[in-house]
Amino acid sequence: MYEQIKLPYATDALEPYIDKETVETHHGKHHATYTKNFNDLAEKAGMANLSAEELLASLDKVSDETLRKGLRNQGGGYYNHNLYFEMFSPNAAKEPTGALATAIADTFGSLDALKEQMSTAAAGQFGSGWAWLSTDKSGKLAVSTSLNQDNPISEGKGMIPIIALDVWEHAYYLKYKNLRPDYIKAFWEILDWSKVSARYEQICC
Ligand code: MN3
């Protein structure tokens, strides 16, 4: 059974950056639906014994095209939103620490440079999708974008995401309307770098 994360904060705790109604709809409706559908499809495919990461990395083993596509979309929707909602905090640490701080400085020059690169990528993602900061097992960082509910795991890049920036309109339209860049700016205010740093070290070091 794939469990949707329980929000580690109240639904209004991210205001004014992300409003209560958006959190309620996004987590309570969209994410809940992805989770239910993913559980049903994983069961149908006989793959529910795998972790979500293992399953998303094994999509090429699913011969039925409709089932494969369903698992990619619903499984991605399940996994991506768990990471998205988990990394926010109303009292977010504003800077990475430890190994992640060092890796960001080495790779991007500075935290601001990373944020700028990822913001530009997220703003430029045409239509629905995500922007990512990912790492491989050796700690090598990369920024990328993906369509729909794809992610660096289902794309087979050998990378594991540590920051998930949702740029589907359902993530921001109630409050920000067409102003995606304003939502992206707000995203950085509530992204908790202590959680991101811990996740990075868990994966790579
Ligand atoms: Mn979403």
Image (cartoon, helix red, strand yellow):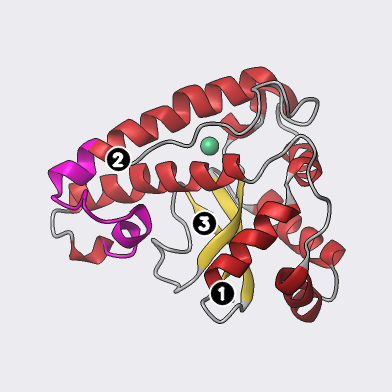
Q: Secondary structure at mark 3?
A: strand
Q: Which span is picked out in magenta? A: 40-58
Residue farthest toward the top in the current orientation of the protein: 21
Question: Residue 125, relative to residue 61: is it above or below?
Answer: above
Would residue 92 be seen by someone viewing this image from the given angle?
yes
Q: Is residue 162 left or right of residue 60?
A: right
Q: Nearer the viewer, mark 2 or mark 1?
A: 1
Whole-angstrom CA distance, mark 3 to mark 2, is: 19 Å
Residue holding disc 2: 38
Q: Quadrant of the N terminus?
A: top left
Q: Nearer the viewer, mark 3 or mark 1?
A: 1
- Quarter-wise, where is residue 50 in the image? bottom left
Q: How far from the left and from the top, in percent, is residue 89? A: 72, 39
Q: How far from the left and from the top, in percent, is residue 64? A: 13, 54
Residue holding disc 3: 146
Residue drawn at x 49%, y 23% is: 28
Please tell me how crowded label 1 is: few (under 14), some (14-19), or many (20+) other residues with Cα within 10 Å.
some
- Quarter-wise, where is residue 175 in the image? top right
Residue type, label 3: Ser
Residue holding disc 1: 204
